[in-house]
């Protein structure tokens, strides 16, 4: 009789944490503000602050709706859609010519995408670790906070060498691909698997 292969549930935690690191990188908006201010000198300090405030609001909305949806259709699909939305939002933001276009792209599309992708890794890890829910959720959520710390310097260097618009473009492409690929590991355990 052949032995049944066991799945290492810690792989889900690693993939989930890496998704969160990618999503958390969006907290580095302040790094882009000087370049945005130089490109758009008519934007007031309030205008410059608006995208970072609205992205948090749309992030929260995305978490609420995606949490409900991922329970029905699965975390992999919802996280993939969220990653694609974030990537598309950043790419569109790279071509923005005014505050409205930038805010819709970065804050609305990107924020909803972050919310959709954010909830899936945590919900999935909790299902894989009924015996260590707090630990699994904590490790996964820690990735979100670590994302900005790990990407500030590379993003600053990229802005200095390529400009902020190219940085948004490459960042969007990279984030979209990374999150969509890592989302493939997100799947709830089958009955009796944990």
Image: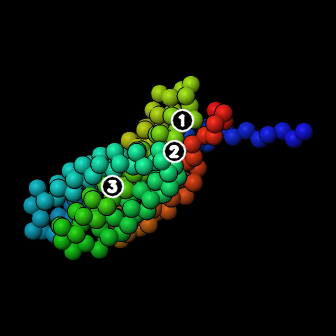
- Residue 67 visible, this orientation: yes
Residue drawn at 36 percent across, 69 percent down = 91
Q: In this view, does 108 lie above or below 147?
A: below
How packed mark 2 is, by other alpha carbons closer than 10 Å (few <14, some 14-19, many 20 or more), is many
Q: Quadrant of the N terminus?
A: top right
**Residue 36: image location, x then y, percent:** 21, 65
N-terminal of the two: label 3 or label 1? 3
Q: Quadrant of the C terminus?
A: top right
The residue closer to the viewer here, 150 or 170, is 170
N-terminal of the two: label 2 or label 1? 2
Q: Residue furthest right?
A: 1
Q: In which quarter of the image is residue 7?
A: top right
Residue drawn at 46 percent across, 40 percent down = 122
* Element carrying mark 3: helix
Q: Compute the Cα span from label 3 to label 1.
A: 23 Å
Q: Is residue 74 above or below residue 96?
A: above
Q: Quadrant of residue 176?
A: bottom left
N-terminal of the two: label 3 or label 2? 2
Image depth: mark 2 or mark 1 in front? 1
How packed mark 3 is, by other alpha carbons closer than 10 Å (few <14, some 14-19, many 20 or more), is many
* Element carrying mark 1: helix
């Amino acid at each position: 009789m052949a032995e049944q292969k066991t799945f290492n549930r810690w792989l889900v935690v690693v993939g989930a944490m890496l998704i969160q690191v990618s999503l958390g990188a969006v907290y580095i908006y302040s790094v882009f503000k000087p370049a945005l201010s130089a490109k758009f000198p008519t934007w007031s300090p309030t205008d410059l602050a608006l995208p970072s405030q609205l992205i948090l609001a749309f992030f929260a909305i995305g978490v609420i709706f995606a949490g409900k949806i991922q329970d029905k259709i699965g975390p992999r699909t919802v996280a993939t859609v969220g990653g694609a939305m974030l990537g598309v939002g950043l790419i569109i933001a790279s071509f923005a010519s005014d505050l409205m276009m930038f805010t819709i792209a970065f804050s609305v599309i990107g924020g909803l995408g972050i919310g959709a992708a954010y909830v899936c890794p945590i919900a999935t890890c909790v299902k894989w670790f009924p015996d260590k829910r707090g630990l699994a959720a904590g490790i996964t959520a820690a990735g979100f906070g670590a994302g900005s710390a790990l990407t500030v310097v590379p993003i600053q260097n990229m802005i200095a060498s390529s400009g902020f618009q190219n940085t948004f473009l490459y960042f969007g492409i990279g984030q979209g691909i990374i999150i969509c690929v890592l989302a493939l590991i997100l799947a709830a355990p089958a009955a009796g698997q944990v």
